[in-house]
Amino acid sequence: MRMQKRKFRIGECAKHLNVERFVIRFWEKEFNLKTDRSIGGQRFYSEEDLAVFKKIKELLYQKGFTIAGARQHIFIHNESKIVASKKTNMDNLDNSKKDLLEIPDMAKKQHSHLVNQLCNLHEKLQKLKELL
C-alpha cells in the first residue's frame, strides 16, 4: 500500500508560511514554480513546494535577498542537487558496466565447468556401455 503525500491548498500554504495568498501566487510566478492543479484550476502544493516557499521566505525576509538574488540562489542550489544526482547516476552506470564486463569471464568459467561435467558424464556413459 502506497502512502499518498500530503497536498496543501493555497490558504493552508499561506497559513503555514504566515503570508497572504497573493504572496504565494507572486512567488510562484517570479520563481517559475510549477504546481499541481485540479481540473477546475485550483492550486495544490506538495510538502516539497512548501519547503521551497519556506526557503524563499527565509531568503527574502530574514537574509535580505532581492527577488533576483533569491531566484539565483535557489536555481544554483537546485542545479547542484541535479549535478550530484547525475554524478551518482553516472557512478551507478559505471558500476553496472563493470558488472557487465565481468559477465563474460563468469560465463567462460561456467562454460568450462559445464564442459568438464559433460566430459565426465560422457566417460561414465562409455563405461556403462562397456558393462552392458
Image (spheres, rainbow, N blue to C red):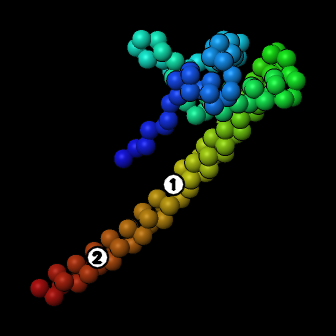
- Seen from the viewer's position, the closer of residues 104 and 48 is 48
- Seen from the viewer's position, the closer of residues 87 and 1 is 1
Task: Give coordinates of residue 125: x percent, y percent.
Answer: 22, 78
Closer to the observer: label 1 or label 2?
Answer: 1
**How far is mark 1 from mark 2, CA to CA?**
25 Å
Residue at the bottom extreme? Answer: 131
Rendering quarter of residue 16: top right
Type of the residue with mark 1: Pro
Task: Give coordinates of residue 91: x percent, y percent.
Answer: 66, 45
Residue depicted at 23% across the width and 84% down the height:
127
- Per the image, label 1 sits on a secondary structure element best described as helix
- Per the image, label 2 sits on a secondary structure element best described as helix
Residue depicted at 56% across the width and 22% down the height:
11
Residue depicted at 68% across the width and 15% down the height:
23
Q: Please state if 129 lies on the left or on the right of 89 as rendered.
A: left
Q: Earlier in the sequence, mark 1 or mark 2?
A: 1
Q: Is residue 52 above or below residue 41?
A: below
Give the residue pinned by disc 1: 104
Give the residue pinned by disc 2: 121
